[in-house]
Amino acid sequence: MRTRDVLAGALLLNAIPHTIMGLAGKRCMTPLGGANSPPAANIVWAGLNILGGAAALGPGTWRSIGQRDADERLRAITWGIIAMAAFAAVYELTPSAAQHRLVRAELASSPAPATRRASPRPFTGGPRILAMTCT
């Protein structure tokens, strides 16, 4: 079993919730911004996870291996996915995760500052615009 393939599975799975929360405009914990990371930080973190997962896989090497080796690598990727899913499930049951959710909920329910627009800006296209609308 290749350690890099296990790592790739974990990184690629971790990108999913951060992508969802970032695109939804919600806050979620990341190493980039802490427990109350803004949506843009979640998008960046998801992108880093995808890039890291792709780099760990070494996509060019898959074409040169046989079916048996590909199946073995896929098994290692699956173990990485299972390990990350188990870690995430256990973490969500901890008091620390409950506290992070409580802080985010309190911040979301507090009144918006006077300088903030009452309605969200419409999406006008492009990744740069998307990053600006998520903040």
Image (cartoon, grey):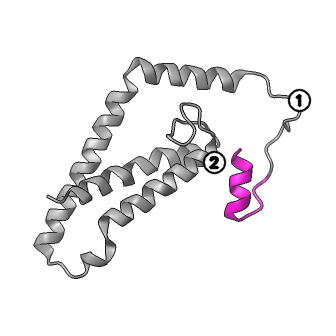
Q: What residue did someone put label 1 on?
A: 114
Quarter containing the C terminus: top right
Q: In the picture provided, is 50 more to the left or to the right than 117?
A: left
**Residue 131 falls within the magenta-colored stretch:** yes
Q: What residue did someone put label 2 on?
A: 40
Q: In the picture provided, is 122 more to the left or to the right than 40?
A: right
| Residue under the point 45% across and 49% down | 16
| Residue under the point 26% across and 76% down | 61
Kindly identify the amino acid type of the residue bearing the numbered disc 1. Answer: Ala
User: In which quarter of the view is residue 119 placed?
Assistant: top right
Q: Position of residue 41 (x, y in %)?
A: 59, 46
Q: In the picture provided, is 3 more to the left or to the right than 106?
A: left
The magenta stretch spans which residues? 122-135
Q: CA distance from mark 2 to mark 1?
A: 22 Å
Q: In the picture provided, is 6 more to the left or to the right than 72?
A: right
Q: How many marks?
A: 2
- Mark 2 secondary-structure assignment: helix
Identity of the residue furthest to the bottom in this view? 64
Crowd tier of the residue under label 2, counting other residues whose Cα lies within 10 Å: few below 14, some 14–19, many 20 or above: many
Does any portion of residue 109 appear in the rendered image?
A: yes
Q: Position of residue 91 (x, y in %)?
A: 36, 29
From what the image shows, is residue 72 above or below residue 113?
below
> Which circle's residue, 2 or 1, is located before the other in the chain?
2
Q: Position of residue 2 (x, y in %)?
A: 18, 60
- Mark 1 secondary-structure assignment: loop
| Residue under the point 62% across and 43% down | 39
| Residue under the point 59% across and 37% down | 37
Kindly identify the amino acid type of the residue bearing the numbered disc 2. Answer: Ala
Crowd tier of the residue under label 1, counting other residues whose Cα lies within 10 Å: few below 14, some 14–19, many 20 or above: few
From what the image shows, is residue 133 above or below residue 116?
below
Does any portion of residue 24 appear in the rendered image?
A: no
